[in-house]
Image: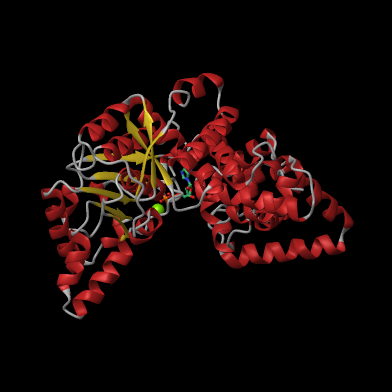
Amino acid sequence: MVEKYNKIWEEIKLELENDLEEVVFADIFEPVNTIFKVVNNYIYIIAPNEFIKKRIEILYLNKINRYLKDKLDEVHKFKIMTQEQAGEELSDNREFSITTPDITIENKYLQGNLNPSYNFDSFVVGNSNRLAYTSAIKIADQPGIVANPLYIFGDVGLGKTHLMQCVGNYILEGDMNKKVLYVKTDQFVEEFVRYASKKRFDEFNQKYRDVDVLLVDDIQFLAKKEKTQKEFFKLFETLHGSQKQIVITSDRNASELKDIMARLTSRFEWGVTVDINRPALDLRIKILKKKLTAETSDASLIPDDVLEYIASVFENNVRELEGALKRVLFYCTAFNLDFNVKNAELALENLVKPRNNGNFLSENKINNVLSIVSDYYRITTIDLISRKRTFKYVFPRQVSMYLIKTIYDIPYKKIGTYYNNRDHSTVMHSVEKITNEIEMNKDVKKDVEKLRIKCGEN
Ligand code: ADP
Ligand code: MG
């Protein structure tokens, strides 16, 4: 029986040899030879030492499990032991065995609300998230011991949920008997209210206290929920007291949380607090490459300049970055187009434009339009935005309002603020007027077109 698994491992090693740099393969996988045992759907392989075991676990375990899935099934997973651990087991005279369990790791993921694709292997590291990443690994490695809680904060779409789930998945993969539970704070609140209304506190407590690792996502949603806060406080005390690891994420630092009782938020600072910042361009490109590998079998499908273009447009949010990549993939595939920058621009047209609404619009862009228009008509920007009523100023002013509205589509009222607080009807009237002029007068049409191009639009 074990022969079968040995054979599979040999096959996987061949694939790894193809995939990895020669030195990496030689260092890490060459010495890993036989299957030690197969227990609970885990196939144990032996690494020569702790260091190599860790390297495999963090960097390659998902990869080899993917291969395994192709060759055998989704149920079996590899697990790594050190030579030393295996030796101890043998001297304990434990029998070599192949057993099948009634619980599978898939079930455990499901029970714990975990998404197994959120793992350390798929998390790309750069300056903006390095500290968070290394802290998460340390904590996953020694849950409840290094720092408790781990508090991760940062803006939306920067990988907090992903990283927090890495911790849970890693612990579960290391020991399937561990109880890991992930919960979004709003769900936690709802659940508490539901149980409380039926006075079934016992069940609620049992569910949440009987865990080894608790992952609580977006804790800011506990604001104003006083009863749930009290309950969560007790839960926190219990788990913390028995060294159960807690991981919390939030959109802000614990000390800046509003409407959550201070004795709770101050406890969030007991462990380690780390933040995740916006990824720099190079990290955004790396993330795109990683996602591309996950989405397609051919990572070179989209050339670097196209990835760079996508990364240059989506700066603030990894989720949007990912969405943009998928859209380019879809668009070019569906219309059978080459993957080039021009087509990527077309694919993303609708995503890029709306981003110019409201908040995303920088003052710079508005100032840019104002100065281009005033240069063109040879007046000063001061006069352009003034309330002066001579035609020399009024017409360019109306043209600039028209351009801002049609390029950036921001509210009339907001546009008025750039012109010494003109009211929204004045702006609306100007935009309408120029719209009509363009219809009636070829020269105006030409001028506006030229200006539009100068403003970076075509
Ligand atoms: P948050 O919880 O901070 O709002 P998420 O964890 O939901 O953000 O991340 C949004 C998306 O971006 C997810 O699909 C996640 O996989 C991806 N993501 C974020 N950061 C990274 C990263 N460093 N490497 C790979 N994927 C990332
Ligand atoms: Mg999240």
Judged left or right of residue 397, residue 420 is left
Q: Is residue 261 above or below residue 164?
A: below
> Count of labels shown?
0
Residue 51 versus residue 365: which sits nearer the camera? 51
Q: Quadrant of residue 43?
A: top left
Q: Quadrant of residue 272?
A: top left
Q: From this viewpoint, which residue is outermost toward the bottom?
A: 198
Judged left or right of residue 340, residue 193 is left
Residue 223 versus residue 7: which sits nearer the camera? 7
Q: Is residue 195 above or below residue 81?
A: below
Image point 42% across, 46% down: which residue?
Answer: 77
Residue 361 seen in the figure: no
Locate the N terminus and report the quarter of the image it occupies: top left
Residue 177 seen in the figure: yes
Image point 60% across, 43% down: which residue?
Answer: 292
Residue 9 versus residue 29: which sits nearer the camera? 9
Q: Is residue 366 above or below residue 132?
A: below
Residue 376, horizontal then vertical, whole percent? 75, 42
Image point 25% across, 33% down: which residue?
Answer: 90
Residue 443, horizontal then vertical, whole percent? 87, 53
